[in-house]
Amino acid sequence: MGIFSFFNKEKKETLDKGLEKTKESVLQKISRAIAGKSKVDEDVLDNLEEALITSDVGVETTLRIIERIEQRVERDKYLNTDELNKILQEEIAALLQENNTVDIADFSAPLPAKPYVIMVVGVNGVGKTTTIGKLAYQYKQAGKKVYLGAADTFRAAAVEQLCIWGERVGVPVVKQQMGSDPASVAYDTLQSAKANDADVVLIDTAGRLHNKINLMNELTKIRNVMQKVVPEAPHDVMLVLDGSTGQNAFEQAKQFTKATHVSSLAITKLDGTAKGGVVIGISDQFKIPVRYIGLGEQMTDLQVFNREEFVKSLLGNSAK
C-alpha cells in the first residue's frame, strides 16, 4: 500500500476520466509506432520518439525515455512490441520518481510547520486562484484551519475571485484595497493566521511576466516580509501551470524558475486537453515535483499527484 494507499477508487475514476483525451491521443500514436512490428527495433523507437514529442512530453525528456528503453533492448536483446506499453510505463514512472519526492501525502497528513505557508505563483488565466480555492476546500475538509491572503492587488478581479472562493469554502480572506503593497497583505495575512492558530496559509500573488526583474523583486519582498512573522515562510512556492497550453507551459515554468525559487507545481485543466504529456516533461526538465493536478471543475477535482496512477491512466493499463 505504502504512501499511495489513500488513492481510492473514486479518485482513480476522476483521474481516468480527466486524462481520457490525452490517453486516447497517446495510445493511438503508440499503436501507429508499433504497427506491423513484432519486436522493438530502431524503426519502432524512432516512431515512439515522434509519438512522445507530439504528445507534448518535450524533446529532451523524450530522448531520455528513448535512451532508457534502448538500454532495456540492449540488455534483454529481444523485446516484443506487446511489452512496449509496460516498459514505457515503468521507465516514465522511474523518471517521475527521480523528480517527485512526496513529503505531503494527502490533505489530512500532518504538516511540517504551523502555520504552513504556501505562496502561489503563476500567470493570469492558468487557474491560480481557482487552485487556491480548491486547496483551501480540501484542507478544510481534512480538518485544517485555513487562511487566504489576497496579495494579487494588481487586478481587482483577482481579489474579488479569491473572496468568492473564501465565502464558498468558508475560510477567511485577508485583503486590502486594489493597488496596495502585496507584501503588506501577506504580512497581515500571516499575522492574522498566527493569532488565530491557523494550520495552512495560502497567499495569492500577481500573475504577470512582463518584467522578470519586477516580478522577482516583488516576490522577494513578499518572502522577506512574511519571514518577519513566520521565519521560514513560505514553506512552499507553488507554480500553477495550465496543462492545456502544452509547450507554453514549459516557457512559463522557465520564466518563473528564473524569477524565483519554485518548490512545487500544480498543473491544471488536464481534463480538457490531449496535452497531458506535458506533466512528464515539465517535471523532468525542471526537477520540480508535481504536487497537484487539476482534472475538472469540482472542488474535489484537484488531486494530489500520484505518479504511478498517472502513468497507468495515461497509458491505459487496467492493472490496479
Image (cartoon, grey):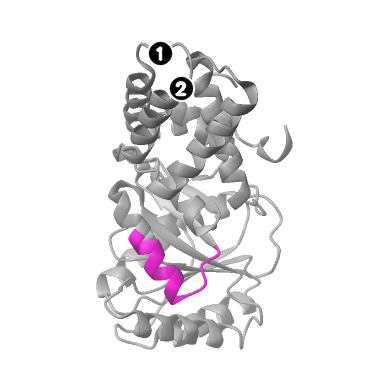
Work out whether residue 42 or residue 197 is closer to the camera in this orientation and state it. 42
Work out whether residue 13 or residue 24 is closer to the camera in this orientation and state it. 24
Question: Is residue 253 magenta-colored?
Answer: yes
What residue type is disc 2 on? Asp
Query: What is the quadrant of residue 232 in the picture?
Result: bottom right
The secondary structure making up most of the magenta span is helix
Q: Residue at x 32, y 23 (%)?
A: 28
> Taking 219 as reference, is 245 above or below it?
above
Distance of label 2 from label 1 (alpha carbons): 8 Å
Q: Are marks 2 and 1 in contact (CB under 8 Å)?
A: yes
Front: mark 2 or 1: 2
Q: Residue at x 60, y 62 (%)?
A: 145
Which x, y percent locates residue 162?
37, 65
What residue type is disc 1 on? Lys
Q: Which mark is residue 296?
A: none
Query: What is the quadrant of residue 110 in the picture?
Result: bottom right
Q: Which residue is mark 1?
A: 37
> Taking 211 as reference, is 278 above or below it?
above
Q: Which element is circle 2 on? A: loop
> Taking 99 as reference, is 15 above or below it?
above
Q: Which residues are magenta?
A: 251-263
Which x, y percent locates residue 116?
63, 67
Q: Quadrant of the C terminus?
A: top right
Question: Is residue 288 magenta-colored?
Answer: no
Q: Which element is circle 1 on? A: loop
Work out whether residue 34 or residue 117 is closer to the camera in this orientation and state it. 34
Q: Which residue is mark 2?
A: 41
